[in-house]
Image (cartoon, rainbow, N blue to C red):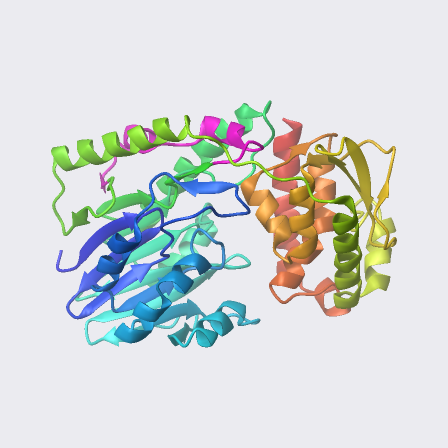
Amino acid sequence: MKSEIEFINHASVLISQGDVHLLSDPWYAGAAFHDGWRLLVEHEDDVVAALLKRVTHIWVSHEHPDHFSVLFFKRFGEQIRIQGIKILFQNTRDRRVAKFFEAQGFDLTELPFNTPVQLSDDYAVTCIKDGFIDSGLFIETAGEKILNLNDCEVNTQQRADEIKRLTGDVEVLLTQFSYAAWKGGAANRSWRLEAAEEKLDAVALQTKTFAPRVVIPFASYVYFSNAMNGCLNDGANHPKEVLERFKDAPFETVVMAPFDRFSGAWSAADQENAVNFWQAQFEDAATREPATYDSVPWDELAQDYVSYVGRVRTTNNTWIMGFFRRFKPFRAFAPIAVKLLDYDKTVLVDFENATLVETDKPADLEMQSASLQFLFKNGFGFDTLMVNGCFEERSTGGFVRATKTFGVDNLNNIGLKVAFSTMFNVHLIKMILTRLYRVARKLEE
């Protein structure tokens, strides 16, 4: 290979060719997803500062905090500005992340989808939209093709073929190798094991479609780090499972430890050292003290609920919400009962009632008051809860019901509203219903 791929951490790699040194998704320290995830290994500031001296561009795939780390950009913002490091981010409707970069005084390029952008004469990147917020990056360097799919959901032949029409066959594929969200409660390990296997099935489909010579598994070097979600680690794939699954595959699987460099050759010793490194990190993570949440004062939680209901009602068409609330069998935006473990009481979240009240209804979900407050205060709150898994489903169908209610904030957070125009967005409705069906089927098994 003429280009060099240096693994940094989790979903972060430095891909260098000529005068371009493109760093992806820099998250190197601190918790993510409301104290729900941590890196298996973190990097000290001096190590990161030294790395940045070699960087010309930074690409951020999407807004999730394990890819877009505000802490990183705040901590190293001055160095990024002084060096003139260029920031690359997808062109989004709300421009929320773009506005953050602009406010920091960074040199930002908003990447159009499916259109090559030249970073130099022999280095081009094409941003590929995926799902609601994610994106992948197709890199062409001096005749070589590298595809970074990070968290992209490329798990059907149709979706893989759509991307293949842009990329053709590639030399190197970088892709996620384990699940990265709530997959059932403590008693539902079977779902997690199935989800882990399905993730490897997706890798198999991707490799069959893109025919890479090399696959680099990444974007899964984290663990669920809270006292509320530790059980979610019990089915996660480790690099050794990836190697076992693809030991007879027609491509080379390259497992890399932090700051390993790959430019075409990878020895058995390189592989063994990296696999042993990560296995030690996973084992050590299992012994680390989990994070815990402080209880939120009741008056504060109640006030945040008032603001939350007001935000949802102001942003969306309440007549349409009321219609779907009573429309069977879909029934969206219905009241949701949440048991607060630290209060040992159940509250009712109801968009038609601006006061947070206790209820004797069976709880749909249970969580700490800090998690519910985070949901109330942030438009991305429920998305965070789904990823960090700091809750349990208390009654059959409770999670699906909660998704059909709390999910309105997820839509608003990406610039969509409950409105007449949304009702005729067939692609959006199909995507939502497909995901709900998948989750419901898993919970019923």
Which part of the image, by quadrant, shows the C terminus? Answer: top right
Q: How many marks?
A: 0
Q: Residue at x 49, y 70 (%)?
A: 100
Q: Classify residue 69 by image quadrant.
A: bottom left
Answer with the quarter of the image where residue 421 lies: bottom right
User: Going by the image, does 289 lie left or right of 356?
Assistant: left
Magenta region, residue range: 225-254
Residue 433 coordinates in the image, percent (x, y): 66, 49
Q: Residue at x 32, y 32 (%)?
A: 281
Residue 426 makes an appearance in the image: no
Q: Is residue 79 left or right of residue 65?
A: left
Toward the viewer: 409 or 291? 291
Magenta span includes 133: no
Task: Name the spot of residue 193 as percent of width and height, x first.
Answer: 48, 27
Tell me the quadrant of the picture where the N terminus can be found.
bottom left
Residue 350, position as x, y percentages in the image: 83, 49
Residue pictured at 28% horizontal, 32% vertical: 243
Residue 243 among those drawn in magenta? yes
Q: Is residue 193 above or below residue 311?
A: above
Relative depth, front residue between 86 and 138: 86
Residue 13 location (% of width, % of height): 28, 54
Q: Is residue 173 left or right of residue 136?
A: left
Residue 183 visible to an observer of this rendering: yes
